[in-house]
Amino acid sequence: MLTGKELFELPFPGANKRSCATCHVPEDNFTLTPTHVARLLETNPDDPLFNAIDADDPNAETLTYEHLKKGLVRVWLPLPDNMDLIDGEGNVTTPPDRRLFVWRSVPSIADTAMTAPFQIDGRLATLEEQAQSAVISHSEGGTVPASELARIAAFQRDVFTSDRARIVAGHLASGGDGSSLPDVEDSLSLSSSEQRGREVYEAACAACHGGASKVTLTNQEVHDSLFPALRPDGTVVYEVPATDPPTAVLAATPGNGFMNIGAAFVTYLGQVDPESEIFTKSVNFPRYRYRFYTDGTRTERVVDLPPKPPPFTGGDLSDFEPEIDADGNPLVGPNRIPQFFSSDPGRAIITGNPSDFEAFDVPTLRGIGRTAPYFHDNSAVELHKVVDFYSQFVLGRFPSLNLPPMHPPENEGPPEALTPDQKSDLIAFLRRL
């Protein structure tokens, strides 16, 4: 009988010769890195990784793999019954099979013993379901015996980024909530910089990514502040009279652990701003708009996202300024910035809920120093780019964190919530986490 590790590494009968390890590469912390893809394409272009399903155009006479060289694989997802795709004018463009595809990175299997649900949109409840789904969608295989799925899942549950992570997973598996578990990071011998970085982590990261003994958000106020109420045209509802800065009216999102921090908007900027430093700007992403209805009859519209911007004749969409309504509030969508299209609906394509527009799972940061590139689509190639993004565009949006964007930036650009020294210390700690 094959072990879970062997099943993970061997191709599945009747499939396209891919195994789990084809994309979750053990030597690269079970991720798919651009370096690995480039090296493999040069040395073994016939490797099962280079299957037509992940080519830039699967129907092209000569297949190319520019997306794959960024560490991205194509993921097909069915539209919920209460959603349609629409064009820029609001005309329904949903294909007959009611599916769309997105380009996403390959997450590590490490620490999955404590990170359910699975996939960055949370569409799979168990590792067994995740394995079966991957065999069908990425290996083009069939149904795997339940006993083999169980062994694959058991293997994945035993892969950890550190012994500290294993301790936390064991505690949570036994029913603990973290309150009775000593801080496992106390066992680390930290340098002065790493210790200061640990303090920055607690102030800036733990609210959403969890502390030493937790892997989920610990500050509901921070989470809820990212879910604005929306008008039918997709624009955010703001308080009246207008405040400075504008204050969004929030939508209720009970039991929702997913968040839209703007990572998908970064992908958008990479597509519209030729001067950006976004790692994936050289490849084309889909350009979607979504219509949400009250139910599966698709007769009563709730909202279109992203909202249709007013006419724009300029060349650089990244500099497009929002219109202001009669109350003095900006006419913007959930990302609070004008946006012409979306490359990935995030959690919304699973729930059919517009509040989940471009929202993704909040991952544990354990082992993050060994899993570059970052975000759901590898848009940030280095860890310092991630920290810059949070410092410039995310942390200052949460008053309860008390990290207003007031520090002078290192270079020309927006004010930041963290100083250069704080960012450097945080990165040092994250590389040890």
Image (tube, helix red, strand yellow):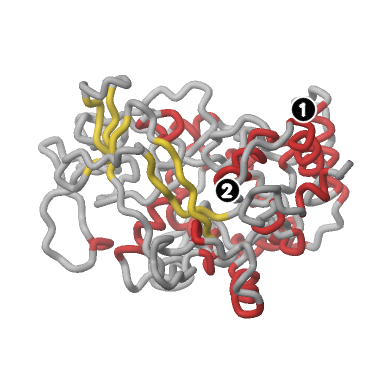
Residue 163 is left or right of residue 335, and the answer is right
Residue at the limit of the structure toward the front, as seen here: 14
Q: Secondary structure at mark 1?
A: loop
Residue 199 is left or right of residue 401, and the answer is right
Residue 159 is left or right of residue 229, and the answer is right
Dividing the picture into quarters, in which one does residue 71 lie? bottom right
- In this view of the protein, which residue sits in the foreground, 1 or 321? 1
Q: Residues within 10 Å of mark 2 (few under 14, many from 20)?
A: some
x and y percent of residue 113 in the render? 75, 37
x and y percent of residue 327 in the render? 14, 35
x and y percent of residue 420 in the render? 56, 66
- In this view of the protein, which residue sits in the foreground, 209 or 77? 77
- The N terminus, quarter of image: top right
Identify the residue at horizontal 71%, vertical 53% (top origin).
11
Of marks 2 and 1, which one's residue comes earlier in the chain? 2
Q: Secondary structure at mark 2?
A: loop
Where is 263 relative to 219, above or below? below
Identify the residue at horizontal 46%, vertical 54% (top origin).
103
Judge depth for marks 2 and 1 and give the one in front: 2
Q: Residues within 10 Å of mark 1 (few under 14, many from 20)?
A: few
Tag 2 residue: 140
In this orientation, does residue 244 appear? Answer: no
Residue 311 is left or right of residue 229, and the answer is left
- Number of numbered discs: 2
Q: Amino acid at mark 2?
A: Glu
Label number found at residue 179: 1
- In this view of the protein, which residue sits in the foreground, 337 or 68? 68
Identify the residue at horizontal 38%, vertical 38% (top origin).
357
x and y percent of residue 81 in the render? 35, 26
Q: Amino acid at mark 1?
A: Ser
Dividing the picture into quarters, in which one does residue 274 lie? bottom left
Where is 166 relative to 415, above or below? above
